[in-house]
Image (spheres, helix red, strand yellow):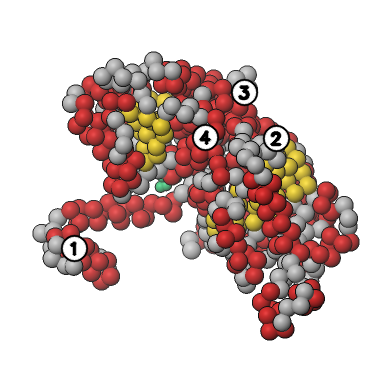
Amino acid sequence: MSADAAAARPTLTTHPAWHALSAHADDMRGRSLRALFAADPSRGTRFTAEAAGLYLDYSKNRITDETIRLLAALARACRLDERIAAMFRGEPINTTEGRAVLHVALRAPRDASIVVDGEDVVPGVHDVLDRMAAFAAQVRDGRWRGHTGRPIRAVVNVGIGGSDLGPVMAYEALRHYSARDLTFRFVSNVDGTDFAEATRDLDPAETLFIIASKTFTTLETMANARTARQWTLAALGDARAVARHFVAVSTNAKAVAAFGIDTSQMFGFWDWVGGRYSMDSAIGLSTMIAVGAERFHEMLAGFHAMDEHFRTAPVERNLPALMGLIAIWHANFFGAATAAVLPYDQYLKRLPAYLQQLTMESNGKHVTLEGARVDYETGPIYWGEPGTNGQHSFYQLIHQGTRIVPCDFIGFGRSLNPIGEHHDLLMANVFAQTQALAFGKTEDEVRAEGTPERLVPHRAFEGNRPTNTILAERLTPHTLGALVALYEHSVFTQGAIWGIDSFDQWGVELGKVLASRIVPELMSADDPPPAHDSSTNALIGRYRRMKAGTER
Ligand code: F6P
């Protein structure tokens, strides 16, 4: 550790608020949700909060009023309110990259004003939104023609990380509202299979590629973009076809031009938008083409409603702050290493994957803003699957495993596809699962059912397993925006308490650098043996032989 970092030891665990929470957690370990609910019949309605069309029931966590009071005190000690204000003011709170963090500006209304480095960024945001809207309308109504004069029928987004997960998640989530005469595909992996399968049944004369990359240097995206260009030109036989079949979304106009896409066909954004916070920037172009500008603006309004709630509501009624603080309670005081996100809506099937990047690339950090090694756990591992599929797979561990897995259950009052009794069956499972996790089933209850004694321990459920339930009336663009902003700001809250930079991602760099060194070693079979460690050398050697067909 450098002298500076050593001098800046983290202080979080020395705060009186942290000590108080630690002592309180010891007390709470002996208390059960059964007893807490029995003692307070209003618990299920008191430990709730509502904003931007979302209802959060956090009563089935092992918390009391005292817990919330102490968590709010911790938030005050860590100056959460000042951190929030600094973000909304456009201060460079991403200190390791010297950047403002202003995804909230992407959904600010047209008449708002947010000044960064002396410039109001809101007009620029709306200029891009307007250009996106004009372009999306042309593609949707067939005015935008391919090189041979045929209308576009397929849109392929080529990007990775935040330039893929947001677009694909939002497309799937809002598919109900999408133009069904257009096909949408998403290519991210540098594995050629991804491109091959995504384009296998598409006609190049009717396909539009959106090359989405904040930096326009990402190896995977550039490789896929080059392949897309070859695929198009091989079929259309004219370099001028690029102009009708490629648009770019990026902050790097120079690299876009160097690739051969005219910058008049580039939709820009700014370095104060992090990749994983960019789905509502121009990176959302595929979403806008799918659902139209009006629906896209409804989504932005949902984001904005949650932003305003986060900015203004007191911690005790602030959904993202509560969710973030309760996540801290589990991670730091109950040793929860993971958290599950369980959407009970098939349209949200990619939400867990999206949230994995949002949460783990943001808060998977081991040093504080000052560069000191933390002496507490940070970002838990997020994972999940849509219900009810997960119930028949990994819920066993959540119910009866040895680890605590806090879960977020997400459900809706009305289905977008009301078929028979399906929705009641679906939602009954949300309520049943959270009930079972909270209250379990005692050995006496199991015995009373006539269970043979040797099976009693197997059939008992300890309960006391924490859940949040998030309900909304229907999955709309507005709800989706509010839901994503809820998680963005919950992540922010956790990062503010841990004192880390939630907006950089240095941890992805080393692997990229090493891969770029290895690439030429794999391409040439004649080169001398590579000079890495003995494992990597042997693996590369075996790969070369397998590639040459001399090793089977
Ligand atoms: O490698 C991680 C990362 O930088 C993510 O943060 C980002 O979302 C992704 O790569 C894609 O980056 P880009 O949009 O610049 O291609």
Which callout, 2 or 3, points to the residue nearer the camera? 2
488 lies left or right of 137: right
List the residue tagged with mark 4.
175
Q: Which amino acid, by three-letter code, is at mark 3?
A: Pro
Question: Could you tell which of marks 2 and 3 lies nearer the N-terminus?
Answer: 2
Q: Which of 353 and 461 is in front in this view?
A: 461
Query: Are there few (<14), some (14-19), or many (20+) residues within 10 Å of tag 2?
Result: many
Q: Residue 184 carries which label?
A: none
Q: Which amino acid, by three-letter code, is at mark 1?
A: Met
Question: Could you tell which of marks 3 and 4 lies nearer the N-terminus?
Answer: 3
Which callout, 3 or 4, points to the residue nearer the camera? 4
Question: Could you tell which of marks 4 and 1 lies nearer the N-terminus?
Answer: 4
Q: Which mark is residue 546?
A: 1
Discs 3, 1 touching: Cβ within 8 Å: no
386 lies left or right of 453: left
Please identify the residue farthest to the bottom as the structure is shown. Answer: 454
Would you say the beta carbon of the disc 4 residue lies within 8 angstroms of ligand 1?
A: no
List the residue tagged with mark 3.
109
Q: Residue at x 22, y 34 (%)?
A: 230
**Residue 278 visible in image:** no
Quadrant of res 241 = top left
Q: Where is residue 177 in the image (x, y as percent from the top left)?
A: 55, 30
Question: Could you tell which of marks 1 and 2 lies nearer the N-terminus?
Answer: 2
Question: Could you tell which of marks 4 and 2 lies nearer the N-terminus?
Answer: 2
Q: Which amino acid, by three-letter code, is at mark 2?
A: Ala
Vertical order, 220 against 281 (above or below): below
CA separation in Å, label 3 and label 4: 25 Å
